[in-house]
Amino acid sequence: MKNQGPLHLDDGGMNSGSESNQVFSRKRTIDAPDIELPPEIEPNTRLKMDGLEFLAKLPADAIPVAFFDPQYRGVLDKLAYGNEGESRERRRSALQQMPEPVIGQFISGMDRVLIPSGHLFLWVDKFHLCQGMKPWFEGTSLEIVDMLTWDKGTFGMGYRTRRRAEYCVILQKRPKKAKGVWKIHNIPDVVKESASQKEHPHSKPVELQGSLLCAVTNEGDFVIDPAAGSFSVLAAARNNDRVFLGCDLNG
Ligand SMILES: C[S@@+](CC[C@H](N)C(=O)[O-])C[C@H]1O[C@@H](n2cnc3c(N)ncnc32)[C@H](O)[C@@H]1O
């Protein structure tokens, strides 16, 4: 079933029984409003634009779901191998880094444009996961409601253990609720999927992002990504008949 997202996993019986007597819901009872976009924000294209500028052009309380994968310095700082800018780190270092206050500005921008009960899927590394990212959400109406681990299946760097996972923190704009908002209940919180790093060193998994966006939107709804890299979210939106709006400094 297309709307069910691409994972097609058994739901462990969580969806059995009639809709009304379940804690969970397979239907969304909230709708995104019709919105008018400025002509420069062309849907389903790879816009070359600053993400903060992009967010400022969107209307408030309009978008059901946002993805954000910040170009943070975390990994490069913490794993200061002395080869930053060299060899395998060259492609990463060439990308525009986002200082922590800029990440906060992006998140405030997404908080403004999300509909009430809208979701933000935020990709983080293990350093932010352990040491905290709360300052990024201060003053916003976003709350952490869940998290999942992406097993990339590849063997990365690390002085002690070698990195092979990244984390997707799930935030929801107030009011916080799942029933009537989150409609797919077979997404596990650990997912293995490969993602091609040919086009971009930080590409995220298209199928997993497709399942996540299907869980919190209906067909035809808008999905945004203001720092889209390889535009994996555009691919996920296309595969699932959602409308993508997003940009990257590098287009
Ligand atoms: C971690 S990557 C995103 C990868 C993406 N999720 C994917 O699946 O390919 C972060 C991206 O943010 C972009 N970036 C950095 N600063 C930006 C800004 N101010 N506006 C828009 N994009 C920016 C970088 O060029 C980089 O491609």
Image (cartoon, grey):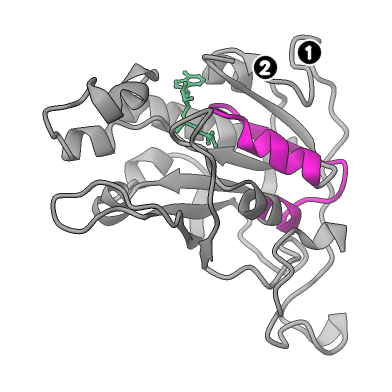
Q: Which residue is pictured at 69% across the width and 64% down the height? A: 7
State which tag comes first along the sequence, 2 or 1.
Answer: 1
Residue 21 position, x and y percent, is: 81, 87
Q: Is residue 26 above or below residue 37?
A: below
Please tell me whether residue 232 belongs to the stretch shown in magenta: yes
Q: Nearer the viewer, residue 156 or 112?
A: 156
Q: Is residue 194 visible?
A: yes
- Answer few, some or many: residues within 10 Å of disc 2's Cα (few below 14, many 20 plus, some between 14 and 19): some
Disc 2 to disc 1: CB gap under 8 Å: yes
Residue that label 2 marks:
57
Q: Amino acid at mark 1?
A: Pro
Q: Which residue is pictured at 69% across the width and 72% down the height? A: 185
Secondary structure at badge 1 equals loop
Q: Is residue 247 above or below residue 147?
A: above
**Which quadrant holds residue 187?**
bottom right
Residue that label 1 marks:
38
Q: Which residues are magenta?
A: 212-239
**Which quadrant holds residue 234?**
top right
Secondary structure at badge 2 equals loop
Residue 140 is left or right of residue 158, and the answer is right
